[in-house]
Image (tube, rainbow, N blue to C red):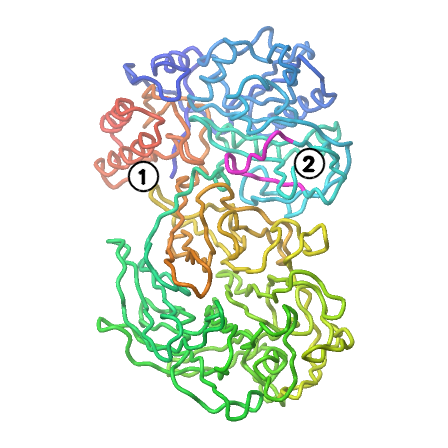
Amino acid sequence: MKHVTWRLRDARTRAVALVAAGALTLPVVAATTSTAQEAEPQQDDDYSVLVVGRTLGFRHGSIVPGTTAIIQLGEQNGFDVDVWDPAQPTRTLPSTPFTSAADLAQYDAIVFLSPVDGTNNPANPPLLNDSEFAAFQGYIRNGGGFAGIHAATDTMHNRPWYGQLVGAYFVNHPAIQGARLVVADRAHPSTAHLETVWNRNDEWYNFNLNPRGNVHVLLTIDERSYSPGSGTMGTDHPMAWCHTFEGGRSWYTALGHTNQSYADPAFLQHILGGIEWAAGAAGGDCGGTDWEHFEKVTLDANTRFPSELDVADDGRVFFIEMGERSQASTPANLKVVDPATQTTSVVDTVDVYTGIATGNAQEDGLLGLALDPDFASNDWLYLYRSVPGPVTCPPSDVPAGSCGVNRLSRFTLTAEGLTEEKAVLDVTVQREQCCHEAGSLEFDRFGNLYISTGDDTNPFESQGYVPIDERPGRQPFDAQRTSANTDDLRGKILRITPTDSGGYTVPAGNLFPPGTPQTRPEIYAMGFRNPFRIETDPETGALYAADYGPDAGGPNADRGPEGRVEWNVVEPGNYGWPYCHAGGAYRDWTFPSGPAGATFDCANPVNESPNNTGMTQLPPVVDPEVWYGRLPFAGGGANVPDIGTGGAPTAGPVYRYDAELESLSSRQWPESYDGRAFFGEWGRTSNNLYTFVLDDDQQVQEINPLFHGVLNPWTRPHEMVFGPDGALYVIKWGHTFGTTGVSTIHRVDYTGGPTCDERDIGASTVVIGGVDTGVPNRVGGASCSINQLIDDDPDSWPNHGEFVRHVEEAANYFVARGLITDRQKGTIVRTAAASDIG
């Protein structure tokens, strides 16, 4: 978009246009009856800001240096500053500027700089009296911008509308001290200049509520990095945020108590970006954690045992069902959701084995699905499944026992279904006992295919600790023969490069170079129990995996720690199972009843099991990135407090934003999520989704809740992927694993609209081709004003009709959001039709 920005000739002309637009204090004004008028072009750096430092209660010493700093920012960045603060007599306006919404319309943004009024005591008068407050409401509702700094949350406690605008109210604070802030949005102009972690000294506010869900969070503070005192917010403590509100823009930062803040370049850029966004002088999306901008769409509400899904470039959603339980041979479905009709059909079936049934642990079947990176042209897809029928057991399993294979195959999808099967890779598994097959498939950006495999070991006779039973005939109860066996493909993440002929090669850089004795070159990483879901970053190729842990409810001095789980950015290495897991080391144990042996050495693990066919000396154990489990963080049961307790991790995708997808109808999630890793705790039914904020070194710096309190239930999130449309696709298992029940396929759309980066200053009304329509220039969705969405650059349009249709589409966008009336839409469209654009 190349919208030209405009300013009416003077404040009086602007006021006339606003009055003509109708009732100024209502969210949607009455239809305009004004005559469209010529507007005067203005320079992009010509706009005005009002700074309100007036106080009726406690007065911050930083108001004067803060005012000085904003005036200087205006001089350096092209905006004029008026001040309303009688305590600064040489700067202040002679009287209140809050006389009417029309008078306030001369300002592109109003900045509240710690204007404390003492209304936390209801007996005190508010900062703005009733008429002033009505003018302020009208200003915001007609597209005005608000920026609040520090104690802007400590004013007008007795006006709930203001609390909604600013996002929360101040409650208390500890002493001034240093703390660690984490940047939640590195795309917004107020935070884009910052590194992921920002350490600074300030006064840290606690609020009456957590605004996440109603605003878009830009910064959070780590309460572990300072002494928060009483009234703490807990693991999710926002400190800066923004949102669109009733047609206007609102931005707030809790920072800025100290005088020194206003000489800090990083902080000054922070407030400059906030003021510019509020004024429309800088673009940016402010809907990423404002849950009203998301919609949960059900694609299929009647699927049984869905395991994995993938989305084709044309929008088709392919997913697999594992197959009915406890069958020696049963058909399992490959299904597809048609994006045009939103109906599901069976593409084809494949026969699978699901015969083992130990309690709820029924984990065989059709397990993994991945579309070939060139699926659009070659129609190849890969399935990982438990093949019916026996095979000879390997030396590590029970001699002459019951074994089978889990097979990776490539198929060609045709109108007749799946054809031309190419068996790519077999993983031999025992079929005497359950559990842990994993089976997730994931391509990276380089064309390598990752396959996750479980430890294929029964966990139910080791009292919830590590199954390392070395007695003869007990091989299915010894995970040393698989996960800790360098010559076995189980309990691993494998990496291969499929070839066009249907085979594979081994890429360089796996854990063991080809030819290394007693190893398999396909092994990328080892030492996993059940890496149920793996994902790769589509931009960097980095691999992410979550690994389940054992079930013990508490630690045992003779056995080791309680049940824990972990999440990792996976590189070639040994992740520890069954000797070490999730930050803890287990003890050797003589089955069935002891005694306990030495604690395993995570730095120098040794596999001396008689069932081991690989190397004895193993690579050192990689420390987990994130781990938690059955005990709370406060009791030493996690290395992060944010997720709480649990035991069923689901690794989700890493999101990558694509600017080319931006449109009024786009489902794409906003840029603020770019580079975030998604995560779910499968064991919960709600409030169980999270995003991980990663720094440039792929270290987790913060864990933020996703959709907590809304869009529930998320009963057991089983799989999450982002499609090529930028929407999130989720398998919701919906019931206990292994039991009969119905599962659901959902799509989560972002409905906040496109992100507008064009400057939109000076015009408080909609201007088309230099003609003022008199319709308030409101902000809709999470970013764009009407002027920003209407591209009236003549060079953009091949003909007039296309331009008028574009304007009508943009106007409909605001009608649908209740921000303009049908009559106001008519005024906008008629003005476009009367222009000579296109």
Please, is residue 206 above or below residue 587 in the view?
above
Q: Quadrant of residue 826?
A: top left
Q: Is residue 345 left or right of residue 148?
A: left
693 up-or-down from 191: above or below: below
Q: Which residue is mark 1?
A: 795
Quadrant the C terminus occupies: top left
- Depth check, mark 1 against mark 2: the one in front is 2
Tag 1–tag 2 contact (CB < 8 Å): no
Q: Is residue 561 visible?
A: yes
Q: To which residue does mark 2 refer?
A: 232
Residue 53 left/right relative to 683? right
Q: Secondary structure at mark 1?
A: helix
Whether residue 679 is visible, yes or no, is no
Q: Residue at x 66, y 50 (%)?
A: 641
> Picture coordinates of residue 465 (x, y %)?
65, 70
| Amino acid type for the residue under numbered disc 1 | Asp
Q: Eyeballing the image, is 758 above or below 31?
A: below
| C-alpha span from label 1 to label 2 | 55 Å
Task: Identify the residue shown where x is 70% and y is 64%.
Answer: 561
Residue 55 is situated, as x and y percent measured from the top left of the image, at 66, 14
Question: Disc 2 on helix, strand or loop?
Answer: loop
> What stretch of residues is rendered in magenta?
207-221
Task: Give x and y (percent) for residue 204.
Answer: 70, 33
Q: Residue at x 38, y 15 (%)?
A: 18
Q: Is residue 209 magenta?
A: yes
In this view of the protein, which residue sits in the foreground, 711 or 755?
711
Q: Position of residue 729 (x, y in %)?
A: 40, 55
Q: Residue 181 or 661: which is nearer the viewer?
A: 181
